[in-house]
Image (spheres, coloured by chain):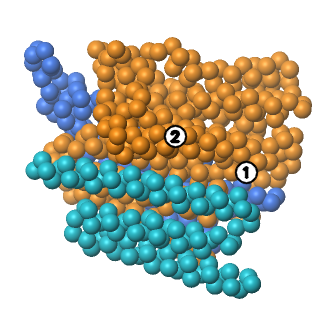
Chain colours: A blue, B orange, C cyan
Amino acid sequence: MSTPTLYGLCAAVLIGFGVYGLIVNPQPLRKILAFNVVGSGVFLLFGVIARRGAGAGFGGDPVPQALLITGIVVAFSATALAVALLLRLHDEAGSVTLASDAPAKADADGHGAHTILPK
Amino acid sequence: MIALDAGLAALIVALGVWVIRARSAFAAVAGFLAYGLLLTLVWVRLHGVDVALTEAAIGGGLTGALLIGAAARLRETEAAARSERPGRIVHVAAALAAIAVTAALAVGVLTLPVPAPSLAQEVAANLAVTEVGNPITGVLLAFRAMDTLLEAIVLLFALIGVWSLAPDRVWGGRPGPQQYADPNGILAYVARVLPPIGIVVGMYIFWVGADHPGGKFQGATIIAAMWLLTIMAGLTDAPPISRTWLRVGLVAGPLVFIAIGFAGAVTAGAFLAYPVGYAKPLIIAIELALMPSLALVLALMLAGAPQRTAS
Amino acid sequence: MSAVLDLFTIVAVACGAFFFLAGTTGLLRFPDTFTRLHALTKADNLGLGLVILGLLPRVDSVFTGCKLVCVWLLVLLSGAVASQLIARSQRRREMNR
């Protein structure tokens, strides 16, 4: 088995584990982590395809590798936005559950609890 | 060499399982950091050194720092969340879905076409016109410059999305909590020693990206990390996001990029086309304008939504 | 001459790998944070230093060799800072208990 095929199978296994973790873990932060594992597995798969396209003196096809650099940066920005949403949810509701009937934190000026999650 | 690859692949899968199955979120994030660094080694084995640099800087470094901060802030909610684990049926269904995805991808990997289709020949044939030696820089800034422009704009949109999550009372304020570090302590010491070295290394990686592995994304990440280090050590404070110089700095890079694109439409016939002989100066101009904006965007995305008022 | 250099590389990298092994064993087996930090710094300083010393005969220019030594110095700096910060926060946590 050649090196790219080995890493391709490794990427497939990583994506599978990431999908499992995304569905099973109840905490949003663990879901974000699992999503990043899926993302890095997809990038690895793409890198395997880039490696197989080596030629003309390059070690790998440059076009998929350039797209991968773009992809890694955009994946970081998506993670940053997801974490910011999660931290805002934590500040507002006091807990980070995605369940729809969660108790909400009372407002700071004593107006009583207001739910921001849809019933 | 297959032993090295098999060992790396086994380690990476084991770390991926650790990230999914660790008990505490902090342990999972620590595993994710190590996973990112091992993935850098895998990229080097796949002959993608530029991608390895980007993975180490952004995938391992910035994402890891972001997730560690989040895990620290969310530490007290873990016990409550753990009691919400779904039942056996969901576990079995998720496992089946995961096995189906893995099997489909494995079949795809094993039946990839031979010989592999590739654009390497076309890139090699056209690289001499752009006068850059690194084919990935040529692809990023000459052949697929539109992707890079849209990526810079997507980063700005994500930053605006993060900023829009500020509560009303701190709208336009400073991101992150007030950092109090001992001015004679070790963190202040390293925040004085490391940034000059870091800035030189960042500029070097940016400049050498024209002919060797490197480029502006990796260099901008290092410079952003140095700025964040001084903020974390309390030597400077995060600027309020309503400051004009900050907003001008953020949009200056993409605006220069778009302006060069329109100039190319006028002088060379298509948006983001370069006139003959002006390819390398224009590429350098785009990179020089884009790198400070990129450093600002990456650092501010890591700092998060505003938490304090501007005063 | 090159055989001597190759032997030097193999011996130095093997010794470096031994120190990494010792550091990892210490990380896994030592009872508390401070002793584990002590084990990890051995891996950082000695292990990485020996590996880089072993790789120095194989570089093709003095500049690359200087870059390798810079890598080692930066890892030393970051390892020392991180160890101090972790130890201080652990001590503060134990005093507050």
Quarter of the image for residue A113 reads top left
Task: List x then y, in percent, for residue A41.
Answer: 49, 55
Residue with the most extreme right position: B276
- Which mark is on residue B212? 1
Residue B5 visible? The answer is no
Task: List x then y, in percent, for residue A26.
Answer: 25, 47
Where is C44 relative to B87, above or below?
below
Residue B48 visible? The answer is yes
Quarter of the image for residue A95 reads top left
- Give whichever of B137, A42 is nearer the camera: B137
- Give whichever of B180, B247 is nearer the camera: B180
- Circle nearer the N terminus (2, 1): 2
The chain ID associated with circle 1 is B
- For the residue labelled by badge 1, is the local secondary structure a helix, a strand or a loop? loop
- Which mark is on residue B291? none
The residues tagged by marks 2 and 1 sit, at their Cα atoms, a distance apart of 24 Å
- For the residue labelled by badge 2, is the local secondary structure a helix, a strand or a loop? helix
Q: Which residue is mark 2?
A: B195
Relative horizontal placement of residue A13, taking residue C3 as reference (left or right): left
Task: List x then y, in percent, for residue C62.
Answer: 72, 62
The chain ID associated with circle 2 is B
